[in-house]
């Protein structure tokens, strides 16, 4: 099982909004590395800096959720149907979009299931750095949408999350 960090841009998508605050399923567009992600892998959802809140520091960047990969390309027919039927949201206007067909779905979408959420008590970037993980790609290259984690880094992050 591999571990990943999926980055959400709070300008376009946020766990603060109504969707997908509840534990549930979500499809996630991963333009890079979707071919390396496998069913059963674990993902940490990383919140990027919201430059609108940068002065106040209202929401620090860090890990806000954990998820399990349910389906990755190439999808089985059943999983493609589940992605097709999932609610699609226009993240710019926070409004529900009409359902898309499988042909309209992005070929790089993965289906994830949220297993834990930490909106009120995230594992912040500063906590991760102080644990000796300041060289993670999500920290050194903050524009990446998805980053792989070594087994050691994933174990350290899981340990930090269990201590919270």
Image (spheres, rainbow, N blue to C red):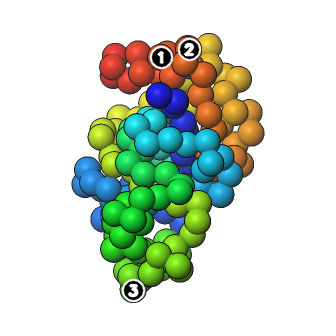
Q: Is residue 141 left or right of residue 21?
A: right
Work out whether residue 63 or residue 71 is closer to the camera in this orientation and state it. 71
Q: Earlier in the sequence, mark 3 or mark 1?
A: 3
Residue depicted at 59% across the width and 60% down the height? 108
Note whether residue 57 is visible.
Answer: no
| Residue holding disc 1 | 155
Q: Residue furthest right?
A: 141
| Residue holding disc 2 | 152
Crowd rating for badge 2 (residues with CA inside 10 Å; few <14, some 14–19, many 20+): few
Element marked by disc 2 = helix
Above or below for 136 versus 23: above
Above or below for 84 versus 2: below
Work out whether residue 161 or residue 4 is closer to the camera in this orientation and state it. 4
Q: Is the Cβ of the residue at disc 3 closer than 8 Å to that at disc 2?
A: no
Q: Residue furthest front?
A: 77
Picture coordinates of residue 77, whole percent (x, y): 39, 65
Query: Residues under labels 3 and 2: Cα distance?
Result: 42 Å
Above or below for 12 versus 123: below
Residue depicted at 47% across the width and 75% down the height? 102
Q: Is the Cβ of the residue at disc 1 closer than 8 Å to that at disc 2?
A: yes
Q: Is residue 145 left or right of residue 103?
A: right
Residue depicted at 39% across the width and 86% down the height? 98
Element marked by disc 3 = loop
| Residue holding disc 3 | 98
Above or below for 162 versus 53: above
The disc placed on residue 29 is none
């Amino acid at each position: 099982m591999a571990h990943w960090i999926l980055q959400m841009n709070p300008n376009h998508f946020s766990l603060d909004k109504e969707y997908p605050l509840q534990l549930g399923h979500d499809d996630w567009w991963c333009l890079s590395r979707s071919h390396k992600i496998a069913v059963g892998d674990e993902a940490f959802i990383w919140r990027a800096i919201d430059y609108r809140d940068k002065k106040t520091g209202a929401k620090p960047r860090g890990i806000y959720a954990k998820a399990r990969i349910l389906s990755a390309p190439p999808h089985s027919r059943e999983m493609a149907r589940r992605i097709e039927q999932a609610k699609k949201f226009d993240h710019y206007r926070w409004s529900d979009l009409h359902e898309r067909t499988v042909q309209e779905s992005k070929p790089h979408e993965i289906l994830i299931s949220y297993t834990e959420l930490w909106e009120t008590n995230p594992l912040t970037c500063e906590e991760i750095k102080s644990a000796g993980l300041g060289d993670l790609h999500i920290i050194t290259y903050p524009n990446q949408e998805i980053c792989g984690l070594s087994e050691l880094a994933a174990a350290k992050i899981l340990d930090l999350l269990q201590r919270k």
